[in-house]
């Protein structure tokens, strides 16, 4: 269905005097093949960085139970390094390839091919510690290294690097979908109602203009303005702007990273504590188990 919708959108665009030169998507090749086959103009595919990072994480989580040392913290570290590398080398395919190739060796303490621009070991070989790895120590284990290299290898091909280099993101699409979804929730069948187009238009207007679209729409329609509506929409938009600025700061992202590590560790700590209580209970039962009384000899 997604591929058919994409073909319909790209095919109908020239009727409005528009041609889409690129599109950002996940690693699903079905949509890409449909566009190449059924749309009569050239379209470049950019890989979505977040989707690519999740794909990498999925590959590693599938191997987690089989490989010693492949913990959620290690997987999170590899994903974060991957995302940083793509964003730092935006528009530079050759530098991106070098950076992606260096991720696993860097984690294992091999810094020969690391760049001076990001490798902390190059700046301070004696005092360097990994910021997000357990104990700040290098990873070890041939099986672990082979698994990490195997997971990241598909992104090292010429075609994959070319698609990743623009550092494309579909977050704006997800955001506008969220705005439309707030007006036409999927749990109700608004698609078959007369209000569907108006609900969709309201979601798009909110995405483009903010909540002040309400006052702009009433003004355009010649309806009476209300001070309360203007006051509330202005308040909501200001809060949204403040939240966006706060979430883009380095301090906020560091705190989110710390909380994420705690969320990852919590199930492990709870499981270990439960196992320890079980062992202690078993030991206590063995220690207090009484021998049956011996029979008295007549």
Image (cartoon, grey):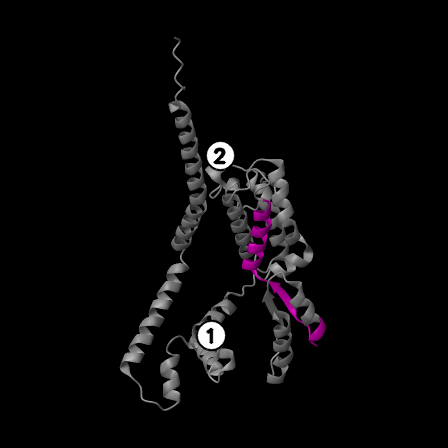
Q: Nearer the viewer, residue 143 or 65?
A: 65
In this figure, which residue is indicated by the disc labeled 1? Answer: 188
Horizontal side, residue 35 vs residue 277: left or right: right
Q: Is residue 289 visible in the rendered structure shown here?
A: yes
Q: Is residue 40 magenta?
A: yes
Residue furthest front in the image: 298
Q: Earlier in the sequence, mark 1 or mark 2?
A: 2
Horizontal side, residue 272 vs residue 230: left or right: right
How far separated are the C-alphas under marks 1 and 2? 61 Å
Secondary structure state at the residue bearing disc 1: loop
x and y, in percent, of residue 156 in the image: 65, 52
Quadrant location of the C terminus in the rendered image: top left
Q: Main secondary structure of the magenta part?
A: helix
Viewer-side label of 1, 2: 1
x and y, in percent, of residue 181 in the image: 46, 72
Q: Residues within 10 Å of mark 2 (few under 14, many from 20)?
A: few
Residue furthest top in the image: 298
In this figure, which residue is indicated by the disc labeled 2? Answer: 126
Q: Nearer the viewer, residue 8 or 149?
A: 8
Compared to residue 265, the image places residue 182 above or below, namely below
Compared to residue 28, the image places residue 39 above or below, namely below
Quadrant location of the N terminus in the rendered image: bottom right
Residue at the (56%, 59%) spot, across then down? 51
x and y, in percent, of residue 78 in the image: 54, 47
x and y, in percent, of residue 42 in the image: 68, 72
Compared to residue 161, the image places residue 291 above or below, namely above
Region rendered in magenta = 37-63
């Amino acid at each position: 269905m997604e591929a058919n919708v994409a073909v319909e959108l790209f095919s109908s665009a020239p009727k409005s005097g528009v041609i889409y030169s690129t599109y950002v998507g996940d690693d699903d090749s079905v949509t890409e093949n449909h566009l190449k086959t059924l749309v009569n103009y050239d379209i470049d595919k950019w890989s979505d960085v977040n989707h690519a990072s999740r794909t990498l994480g999925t590959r590693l989580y599938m191997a987690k139970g089989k490989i010693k040392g492949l913990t959620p913290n290690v997987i999170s570290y590899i994903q974060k390094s991957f995302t940083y590398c793509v964003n730092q080398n935006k528009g530079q395919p050759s530098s991106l390839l070098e950076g992606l190739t260096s991720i696993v060796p860097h984690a294992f303490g091999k810094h020969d091919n690391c760049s001076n621009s990001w490798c902390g070991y190059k700046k301070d070989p004696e005092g360097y510690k990994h910021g997000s790895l357990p104990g700040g120590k290098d990873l070890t284990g041939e099986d672990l290294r082979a698994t990490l290299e195997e997971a990241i290898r598909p992104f090292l091909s010429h075609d994959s690097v070319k698609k990743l280099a623009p550092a494309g993101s579909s977050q704006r699409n997800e955001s506008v979908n969220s705005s439309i979804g707030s007006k036409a929730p999927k749990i109700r069948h608004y698609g078959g109602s007369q209000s569907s187009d108006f609900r969709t238009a309201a979601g798009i207007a909110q995405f483009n203009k903010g909540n002040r679209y309400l006052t702009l729409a009433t003004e355009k329609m010649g309806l009476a303005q209300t001070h309360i509506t203007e006051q509330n929409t202005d308040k909501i938009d200001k809060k949204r702007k403040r939240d966006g600025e706060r979430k883009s700061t380095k301090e906020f992202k560091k705190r989110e990273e710390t909380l994420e590590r705690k969320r990852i560790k919590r199930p492990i700590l709870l499981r270990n504590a439960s196992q320890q209580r079980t062992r202690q209970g078993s030991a206590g039962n063995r220690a207090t188990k009484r021998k049956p009384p011996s029979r008295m000899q007549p």
